[in-house]
Amino acid sequence: EAAVTQSPRNKVAVTGGKVTLSCNQTNNHNNMYWYRQDTGHGLRLIHYSYGAGSTEKGDIPDGYKASRPSQENFSLILELATPSQTSVYFCASGGRGSDYTFGSGTRLLVI
Amino acid sequence: GDSVTQTEGQVALSEEDFLTIHCNYSASGYPALFWYVQYPGEGPQFLFRASRDKEKGSSRGFEATYNKEATSFHLQKASVQESDSAVYYCALSANNNNRIFFGDGTQLVVKP
């Protein structure tokens, strides 16, 4: 069954530390997305990718980097984590003009 | 730019009540319109979509009709159940665009 898998499911990080969130999809979708979800803000797009080797800035990219080494994998990198980046992060994959398949989310706490 | 507005931040109902969650959009042409549902502890799930004026999308008893004139895509269900309690997102994808724009979501709470 096609799916989007995120790891880790939960993460506690120290302020100033580096955090990498991973996402793997078996949908063979070209497009992948990283969102964060906070109360009162819904889903906000951080970075996205059209295929292996490409990354694009979304609406709130500051403080985040992304990496798409292959069709299946898309990572979100916080080089210097801050408490303001405490949130729930969702990865999604999708085809052109089609709906998205979301992962189950990563809950990140930066202390 | 393209955007989606959901009027209600939270809706509280009793079982068997009629549900309406309002969604209005701003985009040129005929964007694809979507509804997603998110249950606690899970990612959002695709519910259904519509791509043409007056087209009705539906799934699991929920439905919405694409209204180009009113730029709306309101979600309705005739009789809600406690298991419908979740966050509902309206979304759009503009023509020839790889992005889906989401509204802020509406929390539905259904009491037994």
Image: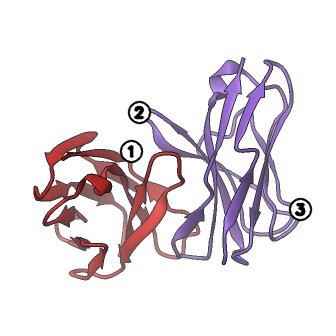
Chain colours: A purple, B red
Q: Residue at x 16, y 57 (%)?
A: B19
Q: Earlier in the sequence, mark 3 or mark 2?
A: 2
Spatial CA distance of label 2 from label 1 is 7 Å
| Kind of residue at badge 3 | Pro
Q: Is residue B94 visible?
A: yes
Q: Residue at x 80, y 20 (%)?
A: A14
Q: Dot 2: within a 10 Å radius of its alpha carbon, few (fewer than 14), some, or many (20 or more) residues?
A: few
Image location (x, y in percent) of residue B43? 54, 54
Q: Dot 1: within a 10 Å radius of its alpha carbon, few (fewer than 14), some, or many (20 or more) residues?
A: many
Check the image and report above or below for A9 versus B45. above
Image location (x, y in percent) of residue B44? 49, 57
Return the residue found at the far left. B17
The residue indicated by pointer 1 is: B104
Q: Which mark is drawn over residue A69?
A: 3
| Kind of residue at badge 2 | Gly
Return the residue found at the far front. B112
Q: Secondary structure at mark 3?
A: loop
The residue indicated by pointer 2 is: A40
Spatial CA distance of label 3 from label 2 is 33 Å
Check the image and report above or below for B10 versus B6. above
Q: Could you tell me which chain the residue with mark 3 belongs to?
A: A
Q: Secondary structure at mark 2?
A: loop
Q: Secondary structure at mark 1?
A: loop
Examine the image and state in which quarter residue B83 appears.
Answer: bottom left
